Image (spheres, helix red, strand yellow):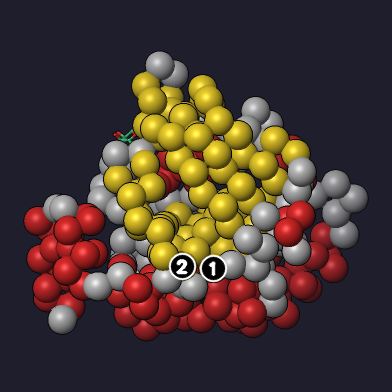
Amino acid sequence: MADSNLSIKGLRAGYGNLDILNGVDLDIPAGQFVALMGPNGAGKSTLLKTLYGMTTVKEGSIDWRGEDIAASKSRAILGEGISFVPQGRCNFPVMTVDENLQMAAYTIRDAKVKADRDYVYDLFPILKTRRSTLAGNMSGGEQQLLEVAMAVLQRPKVLLVDEPSVGLSPAAIGIVFDELLRLHADGMTILLVEQNTKKAMEVAQRAVILRLGKVIWDGTPEDITHDELGELFLTGKMRGELEAAH
Ligand SMILES: Nc1ncnc2c1ncn2[C@@H]1O[C@H](COP(=O)(O)OP(=O)(O)OP(=O)(O)O)[C@@H](O)[C@H]1O
Ligand SMILES: [Mg+2]
């Protein structure tokens, strides 16, 4: 559906006087699964935060369903169908899974809290079995699933997810990515920031690489060669990791 494209044009944004994004152009068609990659400090999190109204936009536009949301506040953006799972842990650790989902439901106007929770328990059966467990006592993978579930409770059209695999075991990474793939199969548009390039390339339909606040590569994962990826990242650490993976 052309009208639910997310279309970013000439976006310059950052924190106060500091510009981090230096003219980002990116069109994301409805239903696409996009992996956003790039070296540390490239501006990946800043781009997600900007889409979610959390930075200062200086120039450019973010067109979402015919409206420029570049100056909108997070609450309004959430209401328009864009949900955000930030980098790092972002649950309420001394509340149970159930209570965390209740907290997430408070942000929904006319929330039918029970129905909303049942909806995510159907989507994430693992969480249903842990509903009375304190979030902070769960494994990292389970907590990451809870955080995705809290965002999905809003029934978004677009899900922004920042580095969900950090600190997780390979098995937990597999579970989180399987859930993202399932949401995508149900029609959700996903913009995923991921340092685990190998995993990201497996799940995403499109790879976008950001460096110094600009998109420097955009294409399908099949189109990018191993050497190109190493060159594009241009950090010894990343290149070493890639070599180790092959
Ligand atoms: N709240 C903030 N205030 C000022 N500068 C910030 C803030 N958050 C991030 N920055 C700076 O913005 C730049 C880009 O950071 P960002 O977090 O977007 O990078 P990233 O690509 O997500 O990196 P990483 O892979 O390490 O998560 C960095 O130089 C960072 O120090
Ligand atoms: Mg980041």
Q: Looking at the image, is 220 positioned above or below residue 46? A: below
- Which quadrant holds the N terminus? bottom right
Residue 10 is situated, as x and y percent measured from the top left of the image, at 50, 35
Q: Earlier in the sequence, mark 1 or mark 2?
A: 1
Tell me the amino acid under the disc marked 2.
Answer: Arg
**Residue 120 visible here:** yes
Q: Residue at x 65, y 28 (%)?
A: 71
Q: Looking at the image, is 24 positioned above or below residue 195? A: above
Q: Residues within 10 Å of mark 2 (few under 14, many from 20)?
A: many
Q: Nearer the viewer, residue 189 or 83?
A: 189
Q: Residue at x 37, y 83 (%)?
A: 171
Q: Are marks 1 and 2 in contact (CB under 8 Å)?
A: yes
Residue 124 is situated, as x and y percent measured from the top left of the image, at 63, 77
Give the CA separation, mark 1 to mark 2. 7 Å
Residue position marked by numbered label 1 in the rendering: 33
Residue 194 is situated, as x and y percent measured from the top left of the image, at 37, 61
**Left or right of 242 in this view: 12:** right
Q: Looking at the image, is 205 positioned above or below residue 174? A: above
Residue position marked by numbered label 2 in the rendering: 206
Q: Residues within 10 Å of mark 1 (few under 14, many from 20)?
A: many
The quadrant holding residue 14 is top left
Tell me the amino acid under the disc marked 1.
Answer: Phe
